[in-house]
Image: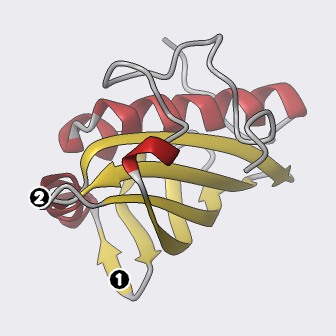
């Protein structure tokens, strides 16, 4: 499989966003880390991460806390080597409290198509389990499942 690399078009940016969503929905930190440069720099909320080893550690902690995680990403904007997305994900904690987390990310890619910088802003909204909107088996979101705009999010 060839890597989708900049400069991005609408089609390639849209594909890149879906591939990122699919990777994160795998909840496999090692797999996800391969989409980033060896020295990738992140800001996720108030946490700063540098490099694949720290990415793996961060994602391992994240998915140990955010149970039954399901994510939808949507392209917001793009240019030569940058993509902006908005997203929402649903999860629950170990006490059964459900949340929908909303956010925006800014991504910057190297020439090979690996993400070298990621800046994420996220807000958590407590929800009732009955108010969940993301109902698919854990893993990749099915192609026929509505996206964020379709769900009014």
Residue 69 position in % (x across, y down)? 33, 43
Residue 138 vertical position relative to residue 8 in the rendered view, above or below: above
Using the rendered view, name the quadrant where residue 16 is placed.
top right
Which residue lies under the disc numbered 1? 48
Q: Residue at x 48, y 11 (%)?
A: 1
> From this viewpoint, which residue is outermost toward the bottom?
46
Front residue of 61/50: it is: 61
Q: Residue at x 38, y 47 (%)?
A: 129
Q: Residue at x 54, y 71 (%)?
A: 120
Residue 127 position in % (x across, y down)? 45, 60
Residue 104 position in % (x across, y down)? 65, 65
- Can I make out residue 47 in this image? yes
Residue 18 position in % (x across, y down)? 60, 30
Residue 80 vertical position relative to residue 93 in the rendered view, above or below: above
Residue 136 vertical position relative to residue 90 in the rendered view, above or below: above
Front residue of 27/14: it is: 27
Using the rendered view, name the quadrant where residue 58 is placed.
bottom left
57 relative position to 82: left or right: left
What coloring was used for the rendering?
Answer: secondary structure
Q: In front of the other: label 2 or label 1?
A: 2
Mark linked to residue 75 = none
Element type at mark 1 = strand
Residue 147 vertical position relative to residue 47 in the rendered view, above or below: above
130 relative position to 82: left or right: left
Which residue lies under the disc numbered 2? 94
- Marks 2 and 1 sit apart, C-alpha to C-alpha, by 25 Å
């Amino acid at each position: 499989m060839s890597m989708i690399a900049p400069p991005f078009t609408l089609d390639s940016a849209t594909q890149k966003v879906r591939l990122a969503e699919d990777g994160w929905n795998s909840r496999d930190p090692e797999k996800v880390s391969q989409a980033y440069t060896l020295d990738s720099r992140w800001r996720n909320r108030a946490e700063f991460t540098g490099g694949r080893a720290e990415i793996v550690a961060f994602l391992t902690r994240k998915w140990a806390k955010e149970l039954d995680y399901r994510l939808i990403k949507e392209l917001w904007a793009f240019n030569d080597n940058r993509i902006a997305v908005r997203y929402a994900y649903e999860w629950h904690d170990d006490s059964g409290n459900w949340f929908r987390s909303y956010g925006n990310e800014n991504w910057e890619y190297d020439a090979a198509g690996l993400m070298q910088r990621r800046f994420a802003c996220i807000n958590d909204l407590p929800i009732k389990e009955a108010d969940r909107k993301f109902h698919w088996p854990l893993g990749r979101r099915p192609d026929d499942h509505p996206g964020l705009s379709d769900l009014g999010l």
